[in-house]
Image: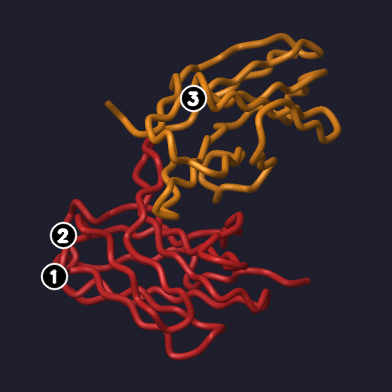
Chain colours: A orange, B red
Amino acid sequence: QKEVEQNSGPLSVPEGAIASLNCTYSDRGSQSFFWYRQYSGKSPELIMFIYSNGDKEDGRFTAQLNKASQYVSLLIRDSQPSDSATYLCAVKGGYQKVTFGIGTKLQVIP
Amino acid sequence: DAMVIQNPRYQVTQFGKPVTLSCSQTLNHNVMYWYQQKSSQAPKLLFHYYDKDFNNEADTPDNFQSRRPNTSFCFLDIRSPGLGDAAMYLCATSTRTSGSSYNEQFFGPGTRLTVL
């Protein structure tokens, strides 16, 4: 079992729709959870982080964490073509190591 | 603006010819990381420094070495690059606060390494 699992996609959504990206993790001792956006050929850019169960909103982005079910998700409201990128889920485990998922490729169709 | 800088952005080397990639930061972060990312794969942590303390991942090949002469700079040395080492190499920084908690990472633009 991979430590951090994501569906590689592509996930295609029409412009203006809500994009839902999901991530599951195996280490129950995980403490912090991060979402990074990575455009093709570029480096990852931090979008959001979340530590506590529940929702955290920042503009069009909402991160959701459920530690009991070991999943974290990212919702992007009013999706724009400029949101088209690969979204990496990263999990900081009990030993402080940050593990990245393979990323989900999001395509927003104009 | 505070940032993480990597040089060069593109590096071409020959099979077996040593290469050094550099990373510098103006964020004054005490933790610096090196990741290897191949196409359509997750970034893979090679090692990290907490101040001058070096932490190597168990599966990082001996071919990869690192130096951190001061807070601002960190180098990745690949002693004998093979074709399988062609990848994007990402440097990242973070802070380490109370206890042993590492915080979110900020990435440099990356160095794309080609091995001929």
Residue at position x 41%, y 44% in the image:
A99
Q: Nearer the viewer, mark 2 or mark 3?
A: 3
Chain of the residue where label 3 is placed in the rendered structure: A
Q: Residue furthest right?
A: A59
Q: Is residue B58 left or right of residue A61?
A: left
Res A2 quadrant in image = top left
Chain of the residue where label 1 is placed in the rendered structure: B
Question: Dots 2 and 1: beta carbons under 8 Å?
Answer: yes
Residue at position x 61%, y 67% in the image:
B98
Residue denoted by label 2: B82
Q: Residue furthest bottom?
A: B69
Q: Is residue A88 left or right of residue A29?
A: right
Q: Nearer the viewer, mark 3 or mark 1?
A: 3
Q: Nearer the viewer, residue A91 or B76?
A: A91
Report the amino acid beneath label 2.
Answer: Gly
Q: Is residue A107 above or below residue B66?
A: above
Distance CA(mark 2)–CA(mark 3): 38 Å
Residue at position x 49%, y 59% in the image:
B110
* On-image quarter of the C terminus of chain B: bottom left
Secondary structure beneath dot 3 equals loop
Distance CA(mark 2)–CA(mark 1): 6 Å
Q: Residues within 10 Å of mark 2 (few under 14, many from 20)?
A: some
Residue at position x 54%, y 85% in the image:
B71
Q: Is residue A18 above or below residue A26?
A: above
Q: Nearer the viewer, residue B99 or A51?
A: B99
Distance CA(mark 3)–CA(mark 1): 43 Å
Residue denoted by label 1: B16
Secondary structure beneath dot 2 equals loop
Residue denoted by label 3: A70
Locate residue B34, reporting x and y percent.
Answer: 41, 63
Report the amino acid beneath label 1.
Answer: Gly
Q: Residues within 10 Å of mark 1 (few under 14, many from 20)?
A: some
